[in-house]
Image: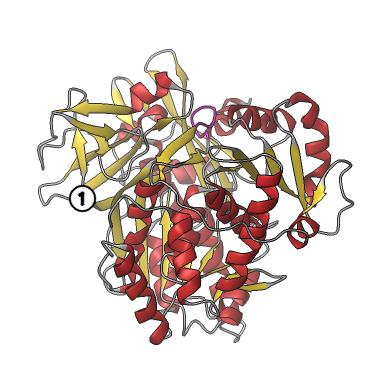
Amino acid sequence: MAKEHHLATVWEHVADAVPGRPALIDPRHTRTWAQYDDRAARLAAALSGMGVGTGGRIAIYAYNRNEWLETTFAAFKLRAVPLNVNYRYLEDELVYLLADGEAEAVVFEGCFAPRIAAVRDRLPRLRHAIQVDDGSPLLDGARAYEDLIAGQSPLPRQARSADDRFVIYTGGTTGMPRGAVYRHGDVLAKTVRGYLFRGLPVPETVEDLLAGVRQLDAADRCPRVMPACPLMHGMGIYTGAMFPMNMGGCTVMADNRRFDPHVLWQTVVRHRVEEITIVGDSFARPLLEALDEAAAAGRPYDLSAFRQMLSAGVIWSQEVKAGLLRHADLKLVDSLGCTEGAMAINVATRGNVGETARFTPNAGTRVLTEDGRDVRPGSGEIGHVAMCVGIPLEYDKDPEKTARTFRVFDGVRYCLPGDQATIEADGTLVLLGRGALCINTGGEKVFPEEVEEVLKRHPGVADCAVVGLPDPLFGEQVAAVVARRPGTDVTAEDLIADTHGRIAGYKVPRRVVFVDAMRRGDNGKMDYPWARAAAEAP
């Protein structure tokens, strides 16, 4: 699609084309496209009246709910910038992100009022607090979201620029979160690729997009997608919201204050959800276990409308994919991606589950050496995964990280987010892992994800993390932190013995530490600093 269009303008056209179709569903309300557009326009008018305008920053601090996306649409209408805030953040983390993002206003769920109260005096730029009702008392000085909307007329539609900025904060897996800055036109061009998953050509113009929306509407095929992962995670907002919205579809949300796989499947059945967006095994494994439990109890979930599951960000193992395919004839799309973009794809179906961590590169993805040379297919050489399509302009206010991550080779600007891989003779990409987490033991490189995948195949392992610990002889030794499956008594010796013969000897963990539960972020990504501290514990 041409990169000279704006997300808000496109969604306004979609609202005009299918006004009565559902756009947002959460446990409290269903909003049609007409209501979605109207409520976002009223919120935009209120924010404009507060002095928030083009380029202004509006933080969103809430669980998955309709107001999360209404605020995003309102910000886009204003040509302002929504900021995704991790709802697990405590005071210092919250101050860091809101200050770094230069937030002028925050839309927050009522349960977070004590945290907002505790930090607002430390944030001189933060002038406005808007509270979304969840039954909590209204914070002193805050405006009630619904009252604010009710007291406004919709903001008139306006011309916008495809150069308007969209910022999404990274998860901070290997450092402090940074805001990846995109053009609206580039985000739109990236997210209309959701048409491919519907078997339709990617639209090249707004007219093409609206023709696709009308075609889907006439066939009653406008997608219903559920982000099982948080909307504040890039995977959630991109594939769980922007993909379906560009097709006149609907984002369905379950209450995600606590991840309950049975509640999620019940929501899928109730609302005839066709697609779920997840982040790897940390979501997929509990979802599979819930399907197994329901089937064993003689009450299997009706998945007749369910067609597809998308994942990105962390490993999604072959065994879990195969288990899901026992329950439904699905397309399982595993995207090698990150906040900065999508690099490659792996599609599993019944009879073709494929191998974990093996992907088909997307257009514009290459595996490059440090000096920008292409890794030769089949050579076994390790290189950096690089992409040049749909990438950010920069990291907000961080020229050093921008210079490290975005590099120019032969006149082409690439993003190298840190993943390392090899290229097989058939052109497929084999992901090894994030270079920053790589373990160097006796001069040999060990990528944690590869060892974790082997450990997870043991029936006694529920979850695990692999880290490097200091070693006086080899520099680093491989260590594993493991959470057992309930009712099992697997030992360190069992796991070490099981791992031998599956991977090279230098990759086998020398130390195994058991914990009650692993610590992952709400985006599904492992907390590796915590895992390293756990592995070091006596």
Q: Is residue 494 in view from this perspective?
A: yes
Q: Residue at x 76, y 42 (%)?
A: 129
Residue 173 x, y percent position in the rendering: 50, 34
Residue 18 x, y percent position in the rendering: 48, 77
Residue 105 x, y percent position in the rendering: 69, 40
Label 1 packing within 10 angstroms: few (<14), some (14-19), many (20+) = few
Q: Residue furthest top?
A: 472
Question: Which range is magenta?
Answer: 172-178
Residue 450 x, y percent position in the rendering: 36, 42
Q: Residue at x 75, y 39 (%)?
A: 128
The image quadrant where one finds the N terminus is bottom left
Up the image or down, 516 lies above or below 311; here it is above
Quadrant for residue 334, please give it: bottom left
404 horizontally vs 150: left or right: left
Amino acid type at image mark 1: Ala
**Location of mark 1 (residue):** 363
Q: Is residue 498 one of those drawn in magenta?
A: no
Asked which colour scheme the image uses, the reply is: secondary structure
